[in-house]
Amino acid sequence: MMIDCQYGHFAKEGKEFVITTPRTPRHWYNYLWNDKYVTFTSQVGFGEGFAQDDMGRRLYIVLNRNIYLLDAENNEHWTANALPVEKGYENFECVHGLGYTKISLTYKNIASCLRLFVPQNNEQCEIWTLKLKNNSDTKRTIKAMPYFKTAMDMFYRPQGYDMGRGYFDAELNAVIGKDYAAFGGEKRVQNYGFLMADNYVTGYDSRNDAFVGPYSDEMLPDAVKRGGCANSECYAEKLCFAIETTIELAPGEEKEVNFVVGITTDFDEVKAYKEKFLTAGGVEKAYAYAVEKLSKDVENVVIDTPDEGLNLLFNGFLKHQASLGSRWARVRHNGFRDTNCDCECMSIVNPKLSWERAKRIISYQYSSGFAPRTFLDGSVLDRNYIDNTVWLNFNIYHHVKEIGDLSILDEIVPFNDGEEVTVYEHMKRSCDYLWNYRGELGLIKIWGGDWNDCLDRAGLKGKGMTVWLSIAWYLANKQFAELACLKGNDADADLAEIRGREMRDIVDRFAWDGEHYLVAYNDDGEKLGSMSCDEGKMHLIPQCWAVLAGIGKDGKEKIAMDSVEKYMTTDLGVKMSWPAYTYRRDNIGATTEKLPGVHENGGVYLHAYTWKTAADCVLKRNDIVQQDIEKMLPANHKWVKKECEPYVMCNSYFPEEAGYRYGKPGQTWRTGSAAWFMKTIAYFVLGLQPELEGLKLNPCLPPDWRECSVSKTFRGADYHITYKQVGEGGCNNFRKITVNGAEHHSPLLPYEQGAAYEVEVLLD
């Protein structure tokens, strides 16, 4: 597939995307992070950055970035980040890479490059490097004025109470902002925001009304009008951070200035950052380490298929995007469900890293087995979504399989209410909790929602029940039974198997609607997702998970997936529900408040779509798998032209019901679709399925992939696997497997740590 994008192109085998215009259809972002600080920037520097502690308390520092450049001779001004000042720039280019962004342009023979990155030793800061080159034949004097708004003293409100203090610290060569906030504990402590430079500072501002002005804006701030900063302090007014530094350039000369931006509760850290980064070579050393580390974090598993767009996405940003989710969840909050889900998927690429992250999120579970929705602003926020706890079981199970070591089940991880238990016990209590939280039909009660947390009013009276979670629990319980048996905990295994058989019978009896599975019952006993409903007759995820869980009887799961193709599949993709709700229903929830075609209400919701593709793989529906991949890929316009970032996954596409938004994406980066699309490709399509004994192959290849390959380092052994389809259509039978030139008679590959295996698989 050729990549068709009028706004840019991939580079470095997908590890970079080069944007060639500042005016993409919307801001195209890159995320930069470590374990304590996260920021994002678009192709014109737009974005925000903040630090976070272990309970989700946040210190917001950056709100947008502008680098104003002024010619000292004539006060001509422009911005190194292209906007908000538009001047007909030449050679504009924004390179989004794994852990860095570079924005380059030329104006009036001054070439500039602004580079942003976040250091990787958990410093609460980001680093900007500005390079200027004089391409004219005369000496030029340029004033550079980096500026950003901030919310460290609260988000701006007219007539709000601003209590911040701002000033210039000559010793640090930095603008400092001070205020109080709870961070690292419940007590409010002083925090210090900073913007420092390694070049002599000729001016500064810490008061927004001084830099921008009360009646001006960022397109032409007062500082630009007067030709420089006002050297303003801030005393209980709205803070900002701005520095002015003057750069003299001879003809052909190039110079650079480094700026460190961040926030901390320890003023000594500000001094330490200056010593570490703003001394000779400090920034470049940190940058080189960041690029190397972030690349290594996701270098495992490399694919080579006939689908160029898939190769570029998978081998580049997709794994990086999944890594973001496994550490920062959806960024806007720290979802328990979200992080567990993404850690499970990341185990395919970097199980050591993802297991440490997994243990961190598991520790927020309660000793009862219940798990919260999220933690934020110093509090564990339980909410009333009942599904959260089931995800830790999938997370743990797949780490055991990927790492190949049952002993990780014996590691001690505390509950958030204090009790310290084994990882195994966390799984057990999760299964027990949900088993004991069932309704009158034996299905698990839905309370305030399951994974589809927009079914948030179906069970508030304590009677509504969720079909999807009952199916998902069946799978989690089955996996727990398997691990219990392997550990020799026969009583736990036997009880789990008894419960599993009972739940399978219950789902078969009460959740089947004739052509597909229901999604839920509400408090009034009404079926949701039934052909008897006037709207919302069918929901996607119970059909997919019936296949993934293996819960179906008499081929019902195949019938259900046939119904998905019949009723829910469009050229754009598969809808989350069908038909969309058109009016609000108090006994269902927020999904009925969303406009038709928006997300859960009949939208093409990609996280759920990846599960559908995984289910198609299980059923060996190769041709449908190929269509699924083509429709989901952001840079593939074979079926419908889509206007989204080609290098990352979004959460949804808007269908025809959304009118002018047809084919347009929802939110990018902050979505579980990335991690699960990655897992679907590696685990289900390419069939890399770990077992305790080794790596097992179980592919379901698109028919057009007559030959493809995948490389993976698995428990210290290197595998390069080539698939060749020698039969007609999608080929799912093993004709011949050779390993290092010798015939091998099992899809379970040999394993020895440190060994290298060249595997060829013929399929017919």
Image (cartoon, rainbow, N blue to C red):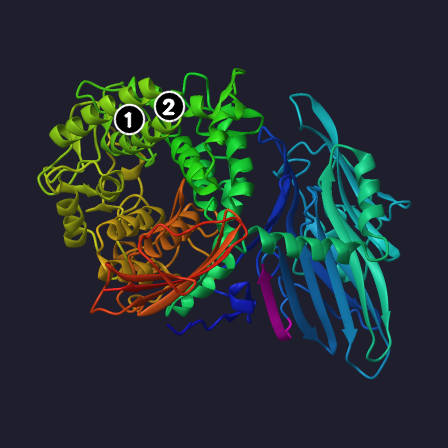
Q: State the image coordinates of residue 669 (x, y, percent, origin top left).
A: 48, 51
**Residue 49 vertical position relative to residue 316 in the rendered view, above or below:** above
Residue at the spot of label 2: 488
Residue at the spot of label 1: 446
Q: Amino acid at mark 1?
A: Ile
**Residue 540 vertical position relative to residue 703 in the rendered view, above or below:** above
Q: State the image coordinates of residue 41 (x, y, percent, origin top left).
A: 59, 55
Is residue 563 visible in this depiction of the protein? Answer: yes
Spot the residue most to the right.
171
Spot the residue most to the bottom.
137
Is residue 167 visible in this depiction of the protein? Answer: no
Q: Nearer the viewer, residue 207 or 371?
A: 371
| Magenta run includes residue 474 | no
Q: Quadrant of the N terminus?
A: bottom left
Residue bounds of the magenta highlight:
87-97
Q: Amino acid at mark 2?
A: Gly
